[in-house]
């Protein structure tokens, strides 16, 4: 029996969160929002690892999905996912995205920072709120172990071999 | 190309800081693999931009720049491609900013324009595209198209624009759905005598990100014609 682990899918998760802040005419400090956003991103990273890991119990995984959703303004927010395997960017509502990750059942997940994050200049919208964009880039690598049952001789002997 | 000055020292290792001029920064913004500009054009453009007497700067809040959003749509059950053209509009009373749709390419999608006027002006606006929507590749457009009746809140009010009027009716009647945003590019007319386009270039290289692949000298180009052909804008 031979086992091998291989990267199943590699894609960059680009999460751009639009942040709005109510203010009395003066632009709020970008540093404060930047610090808050980075803290939220650290939580998000932990929850994604829990959601993706197939050793996590269903109950814990569901809890992680709920907590991850609460990091966003509401569940209508969208996660854009690009992949090295396709040209188009896929869009998912946050809960759909996390539930999709749950179903992937990776054996091992690695999340590495590509861009820690920055907050753009805040600009006043027509509703009086100030708007900025927080950009965070992560490289997500999921590992999956799969096996193929291959018959190699006519004598009813068999062996497990790795399957890409 | 820049001068090196002493920077800081971390754990006994000295790091040097490179002073980069504005000229070098602007040059780094050009897509070096594009053939739609020449070295002499770029040199002239940069010299004008960094001129000591009268340097040129871009103004986010001013007119003279447009976003062209290429999208996949579903029109009368058929998948089609089109582009929406948006610009920044400033509310003079409050100073607030928003993106508004000013035009659409491929008007031949509609076999005829709807003669009836869509009720553009509403007593109370409910939605708008935030001034930073470009930062999320105008993903909010999809939500606004789904709201149907509120789409006109995000359009430039112009009672004579038959194209936007027809678009508003088609979206309202459920014949026109925005399914995917493919690409975004920006067309700038703010630098006197020049037109340039900014597009996102994704590749494993230092010359990557939002770059200038196209630069045109207006002496060799009719601006009105360019706006009509590339952005479907008339007399703007």
Image: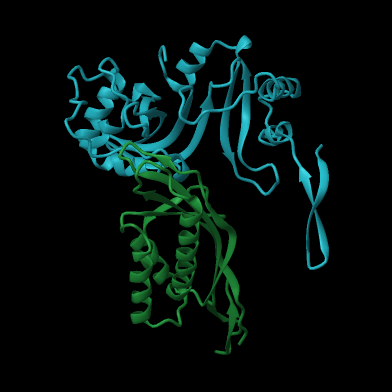
Chain colours: A green, B cyan
Q: Position of residue B4 (x, y in %)?
A: 83, 45
Rendered image quadrant of residue B85: top left
Q: Position of residue B189 (x, y in %)?
A: 53, 21
Residue at 48 percent of width and 52 percent of height:
A134
Q: Quadrant of the N terminus of chain B?
A: top right
Of B3 and B1, nearer the camera is B3
* Image-based side of B89 in relation to B164, left or right: right
Of B74 and B42, nearer the camera is B42
Q: Position of residue B201 (x, y in %)?
A: 60, 40
Can residue B76 be seen by looking at this rendering?
A: no
Residue at 37 percent of width and 80 percent of height:
A60
Rendered image quadrant of residue B159: top left
* Image-based side of B136 in relation to B74, left or right: right
Decide: is A8 above or below B104: below
Q: Quadrant of the C terminus of chain B?
A: top left
Decide: is B90 above or below B48: below
Residue at 49 percent of width and 36 percent of height:
B184
Decide: is A106 above or below A121: below
**Number of marks present in the image shown:** 0
* Image-based side of B184 in relation to A4, left or right: left
């Amino acid at each position: 029996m031979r086992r091998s682990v291989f990267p199943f899918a590699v894609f960059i998760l680009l999460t751009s969160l639009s942040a709005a802040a109510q203010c009395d005419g003066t632009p709020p400090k970008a540093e404060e929002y930047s610090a808050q956003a980075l803290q939220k991103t650290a939580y998000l990273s932990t929850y994604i690892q829990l959601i993706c890991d197939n050793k996590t119990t269903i109950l814990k995984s569901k809890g992680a999905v709920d907590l991850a959703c609460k990091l966003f303004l509401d569940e209508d927010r969208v996660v854009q996912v690009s992949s090295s395997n396709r040209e188009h960017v896929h869009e998912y509502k946050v809960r759909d995205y996390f539930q999709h990750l749950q179903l992937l059942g990776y054996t091992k997940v690695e999340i590495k920072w590509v861009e820690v994050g920055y907050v753009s200049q805040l600009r006043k919208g027509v509703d009086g709120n100030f708007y900025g964009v927080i950009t965070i880039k992560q490289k997500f690598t999921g590992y999956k172990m799969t096996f193929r049952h291959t018959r190699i001789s006519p004598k009813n002997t068999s062996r497990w071999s790795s399957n890409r | 190309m820049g001068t090196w000055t002493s920077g800081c020292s971390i754990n006994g290792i000295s790091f040097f800081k490179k002073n980069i001029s504005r000229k070098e920064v602007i040059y780094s913004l050009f897509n070096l693999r594009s053939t739609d500009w020449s070295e002499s054009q770029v040199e002239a453009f940069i010299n004008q931009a960094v001129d000591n007497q009268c340097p040129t700067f871009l103004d986010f809040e001013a007119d003279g720049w447009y976003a062209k959003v290429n999208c996949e749509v579903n029109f009368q059950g058929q998948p089609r491609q089109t582009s929406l053209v948006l610009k920044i509009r400033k509310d003079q009373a409050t100073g607030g900013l928003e993106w508004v749709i000013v035009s659409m390419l491929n008007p031949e999608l509609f076999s005829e324009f709807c003669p009836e006027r869509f009720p553009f002006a509403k007593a109370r606006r409910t939605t708008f595209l935030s001034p930073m929507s470009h930062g999320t590749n105008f993903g909010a457009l999809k939500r606004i198209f789904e709201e149907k009746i509120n789409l006109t809140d995000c359009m430039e009010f112009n009672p004579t624009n038959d194209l936007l009027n027809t678009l508003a009716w088609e979206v309202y009647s459920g014949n026109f759905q925005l399914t995917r945003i493919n690409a975004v590019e920006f067309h700038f007319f703010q630098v006197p005598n020049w037109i340039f386009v900014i597009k996102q270039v994704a590749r494993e290289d230092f010359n990557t990100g939002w770059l200038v692949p196209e630069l045109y000298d207006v002496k060799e180009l009719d601006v009105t014609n360019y706006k009509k052909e590339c952005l479907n804008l008339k007399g703007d």
